[in-house]
């Protein structure tokens, strides 16, 4: 039997898998990539007797790959918090899917494991910009303020590292980063024992400083839209910048776009809690769009669709 772990390369995917493999130690093949590399099941070859665990990638975007693996006889466990559409009913599929607001995949795995490695779920929630969820999870762990700040910095830095057009834009390939994390039982040990903690944090802060100098392309009372320069740093930081804007202005919607090759854009969209239309639903109005209720994105927005995007964003949230 082969075990194959398929996971988003951001903080939530990394921390969800770390929890699971601490509770269920096993050698496995790793399949991951940059945050927007979502159709990961297309890269999986599995059949009878194989066990595939999927973490933090949309079932809706991986439906064809999932059905192919089930038809071949593989067993699949699926943990996710993004829009899934209709979840297939199949005896070889175990699905743990909840798109509720305030939930991330690390929280779902924490529940599945009965909180055995909850400190990693705290990091995953911080990485997904779910600070209230992270604080609530940490409340019963006896974590002091300095360590809690370390967990928040780690979550934000792990998440930042996943953004880019391809792995060439990333500072550390997600598989390499996971294997580094896997050498430590606790995230605080990674922070004190690996130079990657400081490396990623310093790069994130530098890129965020560059983004903070950008002026909004369009702004109204309820929303703002930013288009960052065409540079690797902007593709790395657009998600962290969107999270920052959502944190400092929680009552406003934010859209941050960065140019890609071939005349496309990548978009990160954040909307206030309680917004009439979720970020995921708004982004699904464009090809390659998706996400969750308060945080969505579009992997490749053609340049000629940018005026349409701006008009719809202004009409919906402005």
Image (tube, rainbow, N blue to C red):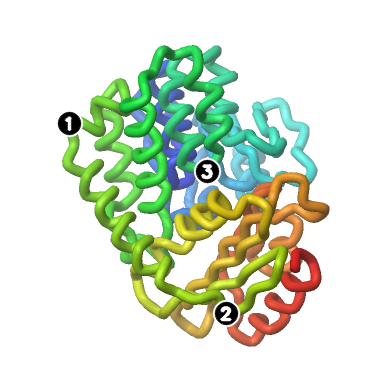
Q: Nearer the viewer, mark 3 or mark 1?
A: 3
Residue 193 image label: 1
- Does residue 57 appear left or right of residue 156 in this picture? right
Quote the CA–CA distance across marks 3 and 1: 25 Å
Secondary structure category for the residue under label 3? loop
- Sequence-earlier tag: 3 or 2: 3
- Sequence-earlier tag: 3 or 1: 3
Query: In this view of the protein, can residue 93 be seen by the observer?
Result: no
- Does residue 187 appear left or right of residue 162 in this picture? left
Residue 129 image label: 3
The residue identified by callout 2 is 217
Relative vertical location of residue 59 with respect to residue 93 in this rendering, above or below: below
Secondary structure category for the residue under label 2? loop
**Could you say which is closer to the camera, residue 303 or residue 33?**
303
Secondary structure category for the residue under label 1? helix
Q: Nearer the viewer, mark 1 or mark 2?
A: 2
Q: Is the residue marked by circle 2 packed among few (<14), some (14-19), or many (20+) residues within 10 Å? A: few
Q: Nearer the viewer, mark 3 or mark 2?
A: 2
Q: Residue at x 25, y 31 (%)?
A: 190
Relative vertical location of residue 91 with respect to residue 168 in this rendering, above or below: above
Q: Residue furthest right?
A: 276
Q: Position of residue 23 (x, y in %)?
A: 42, 16
Q: Quadrant of the N terminus?
A: top left
Quote the CA–CA distance across marks 1 and 2: 42 Å
Q: Position of residue 50 (x, y in %)?
A: 50, 31
Q: Position of residue 79 (x, y in %)?
A: 59, 33
Residue 148 sits in quarter: top left
**Could you say which is closer to the camera, residue 20 or residue 99?**
99
Query: In this view of the protein, can residue 50 be seen by the observer?
Result: yes
Q: Are marks 3 and 2 in contact (CB under 8 Å)?
A: no
Q: Residue at x 47, y 31 (%)?
A: 16
Q: Residue at x 69, y 51 (%)?
A: 272
């Amino acid at each position: 039997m082969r075990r194959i772990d398929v996971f988003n390369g951001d903080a939530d995917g990394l921390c969800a898998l770390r929890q699971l493999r601490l509770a269920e130690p096993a050698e496995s093949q790793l399949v991951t990539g940059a945050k927007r590399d979502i159709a990961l099941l297309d890269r999986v070859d599995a059949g009878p007797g194989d066990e595939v665990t999927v973490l933090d990638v949309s079932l809706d975007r991986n439906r064809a790959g999932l059905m192919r693996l089930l038809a071949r006889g593989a067993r699949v466990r699926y943990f996710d918090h993004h829009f899934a559409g209709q979840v297939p009913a199949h005896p070889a599929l175990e699905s743990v899917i909840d798109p509720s607001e305030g939930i991330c995949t690390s929280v779902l795995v924490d529940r599945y494991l009965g909180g055995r490695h909850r400190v990693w779920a705290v990091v995953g929630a911080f990485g997904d910009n779910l600070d209230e969820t992270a604080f609530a999870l940490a409340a019963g762990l006896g974590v002091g303020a300095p360590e809690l700040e370390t967990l928040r910095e780690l979550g934000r830095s792990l998440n930042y590292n996943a953004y880019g057009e391809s792995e060439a834009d990333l500072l550390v390939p997600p598989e390499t980063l996971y294997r580094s994390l896997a050498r430590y039982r606790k995230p605080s040990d990674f922070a004190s024992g690996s130079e990657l903690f400081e490396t990623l944090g310093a790069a994130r802060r530098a890129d965020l400083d560059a983004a903070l100098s950008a002026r909004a392309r369009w702004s109204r009372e309820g929303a703002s839209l930013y288009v960052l320069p065409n540079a690797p740093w902007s593709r790395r930081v657009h998600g962290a910048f969107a999270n920052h804007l959502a944190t400092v202005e929680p009552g406003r919607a934010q859209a941050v776009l960065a140019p890609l090759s071939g005349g496309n854009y990548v978009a990160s969209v954040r909307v206030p809690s309680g917004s009439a239309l979720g970020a995921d639903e708004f982004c699904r109005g464009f090809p390659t769009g998706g996400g969750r209720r308060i945080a969505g994105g579009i992997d490749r927005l053609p340049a000629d669709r940018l005026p349409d995007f701006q008009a719809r964003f202004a009409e919906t949230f402005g």
